[in-house]
Amino acid sequence: MNTRPLSTQALGDARADKRLQILDGVRRHGSISQAARAAGVSYKAAWQALHTLTNLAGEALVDSSVGGAGGGGARLTPAGERLLQAAGRLEQARRAALSQLGGAGDATAVGAPRTSMRNTLRGRVSALVGAGPREPMVCVRVALDGGAELAALITRESAELLGLAPGLALLALSKATAVQVAPAAGATPGPGVLAGRVQRIYRGTQHDEVTLTLAGGQQLVGFAERPNRLRAGSAAVARVDERVVVLALAG
């Protein structure tokens, strides 16, 4: 029997969040609610995970219309079974490849997500700030290597699926076009205001592209409106809005 090939985008990285764990929980327990409990996430977060996987795969992975004495259940479709099998083989290959690398930094560099975002900064969760369990958004404070702090505003379900907790290693990503660079004079410190020195500057007609070296040696690319007094070596600050920061697990 011919089977439709699944999109490899659905495989992603088993470490990226709990989506594949939830899919495997459906296979094991025959229930989305039980899969959510086993993964330690809410029922709503489990559904978000399954919807995301289905969108990436391009084919239904779960049949949730299964009836039964308990009021219904769920089971994997053949596509869902194939996806879990492929994910298992991919994880085995990843472990074998990373075992040949010299250190955690090598593994992070190799496994970093491939996106159009210019900025990828290393850090750790310092705090999770929310207005309450019913608030759908959570502010994640990220302490960057070198002492600066970013903030990222994400949904509560995303925080659950990533398993975010203080001390967890993260990558904080942002588009360069969303980073505003200005001279350091008069800047107010705080989350999302990163101090550094201009390493390079490329002049434009309305904006200049600026590369900053932050405390700790990490680099950040952003844009400064013209005219400005920025030069190579100038003290500058970059403002990164919490709504544009994307978080990924570092390893």
Image (spheres, rainbow, N blue to C red):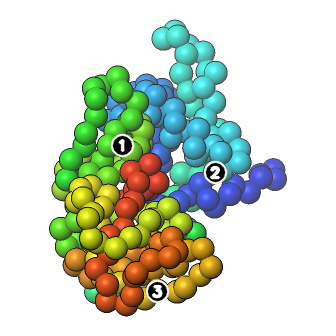
Instruction: Look at 61% across and 21% down and name the residue there.
Output: 66
Apparent side of residue 89 relative to residue 101 in the rendered image (left or right): right
- Identified by mark 1, the residue type is Ala
For the residues carrying marks 1 and 2, which lies nearer the camera in this image?
1
Mark 3 packing: few (<14 Cα in 10 Å), some, or many (20+)?
A: some
Residue tagged 3: 201
* Crowding at mark 1 (Cα within 10 Å: few <14, some 14-19, many 20+): many
Element assignment for label 2: helix
Q: Secondary structure at mark 3?
A: strand
Foreground label between 3 and 1: 3
Q: Amino acid at mark 2?
A: Leu
Dot 1 or dot 2: first in sequence order is 2
Q: Which one is nearer the viewer's eye here, 158 or 26?
A: 158
Query: Pointer 2: residues within 10 angstroms few (<14), some, or many (20+)?
Result: some
**In front of the other: label 2 or label 3?**
3
Q: Are marks 3 and 1 in contact (CB under 8 Å)?
A: no
What residue sits 22% from the left and 71% below the top?
145
Q: Is residue 28 visible?
A: no
- Whole-percent x, y for residue 51 in the image: 59, 38
Among the two numbered marks 3 and 1 on one chain, the one whose residue lies closer to the N terminus: 1
Query: Farthest right residue?
Result: 2
Read off the residue under disc 1: 159
User: Where is residue 169 shown, x and y percent of the image?
Assistant: 26, 62
